[in-house]
Image: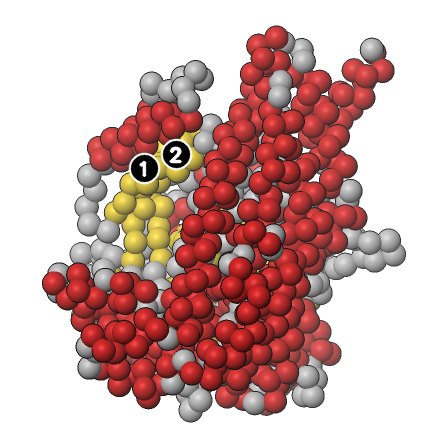
Amino acid sequence: MKKKWLISTFLVCVYSSIFATEGMWIPSLIYMFYSDMQTYGLKLSPEEVYSTNQASLKDAIVSFNGTCTGSVISKEGLLLTNHHCGYDALQKLSTVDNNILEDGYWAKDNAKELSCPWLHVTFVREMLEVTTGVLEGVTNEMDKKTREATVKANIKQIEAKYQLKPGYRAKIKGFNEDNEYYMLITERFDDIRLVGVPPSSVGKFGGDTDNWVWPRHTGDFAIYRVYSNSDNEGVAFNQANKPYKPRYSLPVSLKDKKVGDFSMAYGFPAKTNQHLSSRKLQFYVEDERPKRIAMREACLGIIEPEMKQDAGMHLRYAVKQSKNAKYRKKWKGQLNGLVELHALQRRKDWEEVYKKRMSRMDSWKKRYGNVLEELHQNQEDGEKYELARALFIEYFFYGADILSFSNEFHTLIQRYDTLKVKGKLEGELKRLQEKAKFFFRDVDPQIDERIFMRLSKLYVKGVDEELLPADFKKHWKQHGQKIYKKSIFLNKEKLEELLGKLDKRGLKKLSKDPAYVQSRQLFDFYLDKVRPGYDIYRSKEQGLHKLYVEGVLKMFPDKKIWADANRTLRITYGKIEGSAPKDGMEYKHFTTLSGVLQKYNPDKEEFTLKPRFLEVAKAKDYGDYAQDGELWVCFTASNHTAGGNSGSPMIDADGCIMGVNFDRTWESTMSDFLFDESRCRNIAVDMRYILWVVDKYGGAKHLLDEMKLVK
């Protein structure tokens, strides 16, 4: 008995100790982890990091378009984020004759800044814990449906109390699997304009080869400006709008860095899964991730050779290639890391610790006694639905574009008369005409057909037979041939003509089109057969997962527990440091411009450089941006980051921005599930390299004049 107790205690200690810098912490709870940040070297007060009563660092941090992070770096609303975060917008602004993706862009004054109507940013003005109010009237005896209705009503009532001025929003979100709730007061700005961006040969230097890899030499940054009305409020684009006056803007550091320096990433991490059951993790490692990787690789195997041969094709498929390649490589890194770190066995060991702790008290045993077994059984029963859902998303939204494009016309086809009566028909037609413009610009029918054929085969093979339309499973090849031979959705002139003078005859033609018919067959079958099964499985999983995490919170009160990322504002902290992820391998904590020139290869697209960049780089005019005679390009730190942290400012001990987070090392990608401080490193582009590119290469020193530079 004593031996078992010692093993249990040892496992708890191991589980806790290996997560020294793990965590994505809620800023409003800063006093809970502030002393630990101080031990890492932070010199700011808690109020300087997060406050609602005075300007603080949080007032310079934005959610960039709901998917990334950005930071304000001047009193005139200059906004810094990653090159890849605005990649889609940059593609939309580009043409063959004015290729911003290829050549970069530097606005010489405010009048030359380019409107990006596809972008918006959101500031968090306040975070309030509202758990007690949200759970008022909720009891353990309630069934799930009654509980959800009670919680929903409470949330609606609490949010309604905060009647805020235009542009502000009060939104309550669940944390720790809905065991806690916080309300976020946010302010949104929709007039975002491109100010400066380097060419892709800088902003995407290394391409897919270097993605998720260290050493890295990518200048992954772009500069925008936030605009507001005369009252400094967030509004849509208007030529009369003025640069936004932020509550706070980050000073920009020119100071030298060294190993062990404090680092903080402030941003909006998207999703982590630290509490998954071992059975769920097994499903991801052995089934779901490998099949999704295969579908991404199949798509990339078609588009990448075409992009290399044709500059126009390169521009058309740049965004699609980037999205597919990024996650293909990330998922492969995740699998490697999870296997190498024996994550599945470690999760099983932790579950034994959980069970042993639960057995100490009858009340714990009664409430949590069966939760893990039920989670495992539910996973086994329902994972075919989760896999079908995941592969449907891969196939329908990341595969052949004709499917998702033709499906966009469903509302028009099904609700034509209603739209007409309500005066919304014109707006819907304009929306579809805009969709069509970008579809025909970005999609090549022959390439799309090849993608359809290759991914259809993988989709049919990967999904449980009962979760596929029988007709599609048998005849997908014939349907595909018909689509690419006859569909009006692949004929730019005919579709434009039909939408320009749409009548009932044209509407019928759209409804009978083979692409639309196929897309709806797949989508409707998903809605009728896959989603209901997935919803039942997922609903049960959420309830069990909530109960399981409740047990973690109650039974391990001394354990530092952080809420999984959910695209809300978080703080992570660590130190600048290198890593030694494998035997015999040790990485430095920084890279330099010399490494960029070493990697330069005019015969490899991912490692080409513009002639002017080569000229400026070889001149070695580093000015105030050098450290020991070298120009740092990127650096690594032990911050726990995730998707959504792209663009997060890397903040030093004094509160200055010293870099911009844009990636993790390949050995770190499993940190969405398991963080290991010995190998997990985030990658940031150094602010001094950004300033050097803006100044020496871009010739846009006037932008630096806006910033507060700290030496």
Disc ID at residue 473? none
**Picture coordinates of residue 98 (x, y %)?**
41, 87
Q: Nearer the viewer, mark 1 or mark 2?
A: 2
**Mark 1 vs mark 2, CA separation in Å:** 18 Å
Q: Picture coordinates of residue 61 (x, y %)? A: 41, 52
The reply to whether residue 451 is in sight is no
Quadrant into which the N terminus falls: top right
The percent position of residue 658, horizontal first and vertical second, equals 54, 58
| Residue visible at 69% across and 88% down in the picture | 603
What residue is rendered at 42% in x and 22% in y? Answer: 143
Q: Which colour style is shown?
A: secondary structure
Secondary structure of the residue carrying numbered label 1: loop
* Front-most of residues 292 and 382: 382
Q: Quadrant of residue 282?
A: top right
User: What amino acid type is highlighted by mark number 1?
Assistant: Asn
Instruction: Mark yes or no: residue 614 visible.
Output: yes
Q: Label 1: which residue?
A: 53
Image height check: is 663 above or below 427? above
Farthest residue toward the right? 584
Hey, what amino acid is under mark 2?
Tyr
Identify whether 581 is placed above or below 160.
Answer: below
Residue 616 is drawn in which quadrant?
bottom right
